[in-house]
Image (cartoon, rainbow, N blue to C red):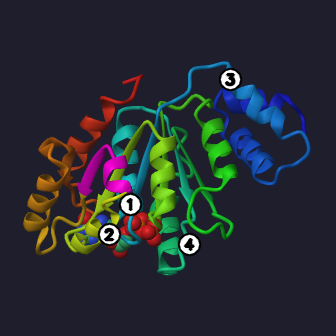
């Protein structure tokens, strides 16, 4: 592979970024050069979005991307294992929703399968995320479906981890308590248009102690996303 592609990727060329990611993903000969080349500029902040299947993570990411694009910010999105076995329809939904960004110069979106790794981020996803942080974006967002271990790993990798829950997540929160509840920086009660949102939000606020870390959103309509984005911006070095 031509090394000039690496330089083009690092200066933000989407085609070259895509080729470099495939290079890393397939561990093609010399892929280490791509990873090593990344150490020269300032890395973009990494926002991790995680939570149970179907909580609305992709919808929320899409809404956040809209806000960033409206501000002229460049953003990369990495979706790890979007074809979760829990519901097959999600991939198609993601494609339709996210599809509108493919021709938007400010946005780069890439899906990665977790290649059957049992929970947890595979090392390749980690390398690709690292690489993307050096490609001239104002921020990089990584979405992972919460299957326990991966959530905690994402939290370790990201500068800011957002746990997306829904009004029905009460039991899940009990279950997660030990690991992710502590690892997350911000908590989103998405689908706040559904019954029980208020009660669950109150319980969650009591549990995390800091009330201003809990946000209510309706990702599908964009409600509450501006407030969340403002809070996220505090973590972005460049905004
Ligand atoms: N009522 C309501 N529905 C929503 C909201 N946000 C998302 N949805 C719907 O919930 C479904 C799942 O949304 P996704 O964004 O695909 O959820 P996800 O968490 O990315 O799903 P996976 O990646 O498969 O785990 C879709 O049908 C969305 O339209 C919301 O705020 N309110
Ligand atoms: Mg999704």
Q: In which quarter of the image is ligand 2?
A: bottom left
CA–CA distance between discs 1 and 4?
13 Å
Q: Is mark 2 on a helix, strand or loop?
A: helix
Residue located at (15% from left, 43% from top): 210
- Mark 3 and 4 residues: CB-CB less than 8 Å, in contact? no
Nearest the viewer among 166 and 224 is 166
| Residue 183 within the magenta-colored segment of the rendering | yes
Magenta span covers which residues?
179-188
Does 101 sit above or below residue 11? below
Identify the image quadrant of the N terminus.
Answer: top right
Q: Which of marks 2 and 4 is in front?
A: 2
- Mark 2 and 4 residues: CB-CB less than 8 Å, in contact? no
> Going from the N terminus, do you reach mark 3 or mark 2 first?
3
Q: How crowded is mark 4: few (under 14 residues within 10 Å), some or many (20 or more)?
A: some
| Residue beneath disc 4 | 83
| Residue beneath disc 3 | 39
Place of residue 200 in the rendered image (x, y in percent of width and height, measured from the top left): 13, 66
> Going from the N terminus, do you reach mark 1 or mark 2 first?
1
Place of residue 195 in the rendered image (x, y in percent of width and height, measured from the top left): 11, 75
* Residue 100 appears in the rendering: no
Q: Residue at the far front: name it.
A: 178
Does 65 sit above or below residue 176? above
Task: Tell me: is circle 1 under 8 Å from ligand 1.
Answer: yes
Residue located at (14% from left, 46% from top): 209
| Residue beneath disc 2 | 175
| Residue beneath disc 1 | 57
């Amino acid at each position: 592979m031509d090394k000039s592609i690496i330089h083009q990727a690092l200066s933000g060329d989407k085609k070259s970024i895509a080729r470099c990611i495939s290079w890393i993903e397939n561990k093609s000969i010399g892929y280490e050069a791509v990873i090593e080349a990344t150490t020269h500029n300032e890395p973009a902040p990494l926002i991790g979005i995680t939570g149970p299947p179907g909580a609305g993570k992709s919808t929320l990411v899409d809404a956040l991307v809209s806000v960033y694009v409206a501000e002229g910010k460049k953003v990369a999105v990495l979706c790890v294992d979007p074809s979760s076995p829990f519901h097959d329809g999600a991939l198609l939904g993601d494609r339709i929703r996210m599809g509108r960004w493919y021709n938007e110069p400010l946005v780069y979106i890439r899906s990665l399968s977790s290649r059957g790794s049992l929970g947890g981020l595979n090392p390749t996803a980690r390398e690709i995320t690292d690489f993307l942080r050096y490609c001239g974006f104002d921020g990089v967002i990584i979405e992972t479906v919460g299957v326990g271990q991966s959530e905690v790993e994402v939290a370790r990798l990201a500068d800011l981890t957002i746990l997306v829950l829904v009004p029905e997540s009460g039991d899940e929160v009990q279950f997660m308590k030990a690991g992710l509840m502590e690892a997350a920086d911000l908590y989103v009660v998405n689908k706040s248009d559904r019954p029980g949102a208020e009660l669950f939000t109150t319980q969650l606020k009591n549990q995390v102690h800091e009330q201003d870390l809990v946000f209510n959103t309706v990702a599908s309509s964009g409600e509450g996303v501006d407030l969340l984005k403002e809070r996220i911006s505090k973590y972005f070095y460049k905004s």
